[in-house]
Image (cartoon, rainbow, N blue to C red):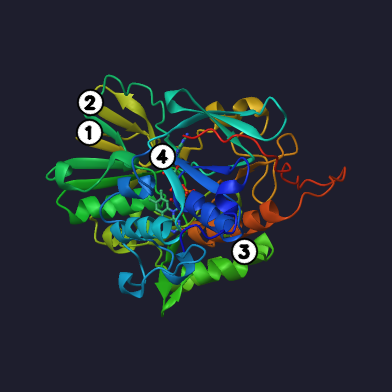
Amino acid sequence: MPGAPTEPDLMTTQPRPVYVIGGGPGGLAAAAALRARGVRAVVVEKAPAVGASWRGHYDRLHLHTTRRLSALPGLAIPRRFGRWVSRDNVVRYLEKYAEHHELEVVTGVEVSRIDPAPDGEGWILHASGGRELAARAVVVATGFNHTPRLPDWPGQEAWPGRIAHAADYRNPTPYAGQDVLVVGVGNTGAEIAVDLADGGAARVRLAVRTAPHILRRSTAGWPAQRTGILVRHLPVPLVDRLARLVARISVPDLSAYGLPRPETGLYTRVRQGAIPVQDVGLIDAVRAGRVEPVAAVEGFDGAEVVLADGSRITPDAVIAATGYRRGLEGLVGHLGVLDERGRPTAHVPHSPAEAPGLYFTGYTNPISGMFRELARDAEKLARALSRPPRRRRSADRSVPHPPARPAPTVQP
Ligand SMILES: Cc1cc2nc3c(=O)[nH]c(=O)nc-3n(C[C@H](O)[C@H](O)[C@H](O)COP(=O)(O)OP(=O)(O)OC[C@H]3O[C@@H](n4cnc5c(N)ncnc54)[C@H](O)[C@@H]3O)c2cc1C
């Protein structure tokens, strides 16, 4: 009724908001969980729309985690998207997610640096266009796969062929009829190699430094992800033994084709940062000779690619599926919150001891599925940030959020 007194709107009368940097699944989940607890959260995304990483992935990509186990808090992924959700439907889901939760998302704004607020109350975000955004707390969700990592191979500048990072690969069309070397046998390298072989490349080789663990995406309807969830808290040697057994039963021995079974256990490798490869066609392609494993790349010499076993090959193109860096140095490197690998020293719901109110989500690579962990972390974060501040104990690594204090919010 016009003129009637209204309840004060907590979402707009709150002081400085929580700023969430990154409008991918991690940032959106965090913002939604915070909003559900009455905490104002503003997502700042550098791209023109949410889900930028997924928009940029290759055409053939589907989630290898199941639809049900990949949903973010407060919105199921529609059943019609199927069990293994396609890239386009992941993007559709993320768009719908932001709309459904009525998230405040500012797009086209890149945060370049985070500093403590001069008044000691939270943080200042320095963003594109000279913006300075005052935050009560900050959630950094800029992605595990932030900056493509391209090795500095000797001789690569003089090599006459085309070298691309997997981040720029969309589909096999530009490689039709070509001899292609894919470097790196993680999930991305394995799938791109199969995509090229299916899509008309004349020859596809896959350079392997360390033989990967290969898993069936699902066995008799049971998804590998569920096993990952069940075993993730078991002792590493036990999981290694179980995985060895399962692999012997479900995955053929590919040693004769250049892909021996790894000597290091599956969970040991996961702890070192190497997620097993989910088979979406690699096993069949290798057995059929359509994808040929070769030794790791050592460098380039004229028109030749030099491999670790001393052999030399002359592909037309190289696709480097050689991973990503976190790329957090510019944003928070000066705050002493990164370890020697450039990863945050604390993960939600904890803040690094040096930086209370600064949270990081999405900087691990769990076997239980990243979407699932992002969803769980979002709930934990929202619980931590909506709790009344409590006194810090000396041995407590969990640093409570800074108390809210009325202050003008700098609008983006
Ligand atoms: C090929 C591939 C397949 C995957 N498949 C699965 C799967 O099947 N299941 C699963 O659970 N996980 C999967 N993952 C892992 C993970 O779930 C995804 O990478 C997921 O997108 C991570 O979400 P995120 O929000 O942490 O990061 P991202 O989705 O990368 O989002 C980060 C966002 O931050 C923005 N941003 C970055 N820097 C700034 C800045 N300075 N200022 C403002 N905005 C910024 C980016 O534009 C981006 O939109 C896959 C990853 C890859 C690479």
In which quarter of the view is residue 267 placed?
A: bottom right
In which quarter of the view is residue 62 placed?
A: bottom left
Residue type at numbered disc 1 = Thr
Q: Which residue is mark 3?
A: 232
Q: In the picture provided, is 115 more to the left or to the right than 313?
A: right
The first of marks 2 and 4 along the sequence is 2
The answer for how far apart the CA atoms under marks 2 and 3 are is 46 Å
- Mark 4 and mark 3 residues within 8 Å of each other at the beta carbon: no
What residue sits 38% from the left and 46% below the top? 53
The secondary element bearing badge 3 is classed as: loop
Frontmost residue, 330 versus 289:
330
- Mark 2 and mark 1 residues within 8 Å of each other at the beta carbon: yes
The answer for how far apart the CA atoms under marks 1 and 3 are is 42 Å
Frontmost residue, 391 versus 365:
391
In which quarter of the view is residue 168 placed?
A: top left
User: How far across and how far down the image is residue 282, in percent?
Assistant: 32, 59
- Mark 2 and mark 3 residues within 8 Å of each other at the beta carbon: no
Q: Is mark 4 within 8 Å of ligand 1?
A: no
The first of marks 1 and 4 along the sequence is 1
Q: Find the residue positioned furthest to the front.
A: 3
User: 10 Å neighbourhood of mark 2: few (<14), some, or many (≥20)?
Assistant: some
Residue type at numbered disc 3 = Arg
Q: Is residue 264 visible from the viewing direction of this image?
A: no
Q: Which residue is mark 1?
A: 314
Q: Which residue is mark 2?
A: 303
User: How far across and how far down the image is residue 128, in percent?
Assistant: 44, 27
Residue type at numbered disc 2 = Ala
Give residue 322's mark: 4
The answer for how far apart the CA atoms under marks 2 and 4 are is 21 Å
The secondary element bearing badge 4 is classed as: loop
Image depth: mark 1 or mark 3 in front: 3
